[in-house]
Image: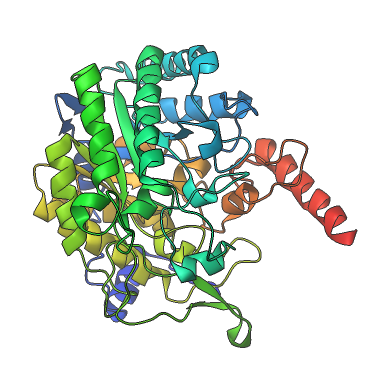
Amino acid sequence: MRYFQYKTLNELEAESAQLGCGHVSFVQDRARIQQALGRPVAVGNRTVGNSMCIHPMEGCDGDLAGTPGELTWRRYVRFAEGGAKLVWFEATAVREDGRANARQLWLHRANVGEYARLLAEIRLRHKAKHGTADDLLVPVQLTHSGRYSVPRKTIAYHNPLIDQKSNTPADYPLITDDELEQLEDDYVATAGLAREAGFDSLDLKVTHGYLLSELMGAKLREGRYGGPIENRTRFAVNVLGKIRAKFGNAFVLTMRLGCFDSVPYVKDAARDNIGVPLPYELPYPHGFGVSAEDPLREDLNDVKAAIAIYQQAGIELLNVSLGCPYYNPHVGRPFEKPDEGNYEMPEHPLNGVDRHFRIAGELQRSFPGLPMVGTGYSWLQIYAPHAAAANVEAGRIRFFGYGRGALAYPHFAQDILEKGELDAKQVCRTVTFCTWLMRQKHNELGQFPSGCPPYDKETYGPIIKQARELLRIQNAK
């Protein structure tokens, strides 16, 4: 179904009001947009030069050893020149067995020099284009992919619905407390390599259903890392404490936190493949940020308790994320068209945008001294900066975060700063080709690189054509 048919911002505003999306508002004046999104933001002892962020978007384009490849370099050069002053470096595994695909980045002793060269190039290109890189922040996101690791998954607890969606046997063994404690040291060791490479900001990835995110919902797990919120935050708190003890204030510590898990969705063939939640029990005993009485709605009490704990542990910047792309992609990324084979939107995308803004706004107001990055803007297309400016002006968020949109339009920030608006011919249409490419594994490297075929045709047009042809051959066998 086509949702985005608005010819003017007034039409979009009217639809938003009709749907009851009271947390979605817009600034129409271009000068106000430039002022709001151009304002600098204090993050710890640093000043980030404007209020725009490129989210950590994985390109699945490293080599098999986890080293940045040619397309990785190309992507970050484009981001560096694009004008955003917060460029969040994508999920980088702390161990080989913590990678979500064969070409996910993995920082280790043998390739630290390549990361150093790439980071230096990012700063060099940004300075050449924008005058200085002193106000550019590039956090590197450290991750372990947990149950989505390949070839062997690592899980923190059993949620029957997630187990069903991820084809995880009910008797699959859990990672032990001792193994988790050992993994903490792997994070710290990788932090040391990141420092050698020149990174001065670190992110712990606690979202999208990966290991640290799964721990946040492990209410029924026994032992040191499950049950009460103090235990479910223990892993990240321990890592943060060990990093501070070993490296002092060498890093600005950040976190991308999944603040609403919801439940897994599947296609309903009888209803035109619309997404429907798997049947769940009440009260719902799992998950993070979910209401036990209605897990399709958020309950932020646990989330606020966790953020307070993480802030006390040293977090200076929080990136607010929702949902899991593996089992409810519409929650995290309201879309116009699903990736091929996935379910259709179970709600109007504006309701998903409203959920993002509602949750992020409540959290930013609850922690005014902790700058936060908002998500959920891409579906708004050319009107994304209008909504972002409204949120920044009202204090509902400190940074406008752009994800899929940055793959299609890496210099969006420069256009906003210079013109106060985006070019309609370059904005992401949320038709999800990037996600489809990310899901394709059927080549000699075990993974196709991900990018934007519609708006980066010269590079990714041939790649998606090859992926489709190989898939056709595979399916014909």
The image quadrant of residue 198 is top left
Q: Position of residue 249 (x, y in %)?
A: 18, 20
* Residue ID at (84%, 54%): 474
Q: Residue furthest bottom?
A: 270
Query: Where 439 sits versus 328, above or below?
Result: above
The colour scheme is rainbow
Q: Nearer the viewer, residue 384 or 45?
A: 45
Number of on-image labels: 0
Q: Is residue 465 above or below residue 106?
A: below
Work out whether residue 230 can be spotted.
yes
| Quarter placement of the N terminus | bottom right
Q: Is residue 394 visible?
A: no
Q: Position of residue 245 (x, y in %)?
A: 20, 22
**In the displayed structure image, the side of residue 133 where residue 48 appears, left or right:** left
In this view, 364 is above or below 179: below
In the shown orientation, is residue 350 left or right of residue 103?
Answer: left
Left or right of 177, for residue 275: right
Residue at point 50% right, 15% down?
Answer: 109
Residue 116 location (% of width, % of height): 45, 14
At 41% from the left edge and 79% from the top edge, which residue is drawn? 280
Left-right relation of 315 to 105: left
Question: Where's the C terminus, which quadrant?
Answer: bottom right
Give x and y (percent) for residue 226. Answer: 29, 55
Q: Nearer the viewer, residue 91 or 462?
A: 91
Q: Nearer the viewer, residue 248 or 119?
A: 248
Out of 472 and 257, give the one closest to the viewer: 257
Residue ranking furthest to the right: 477
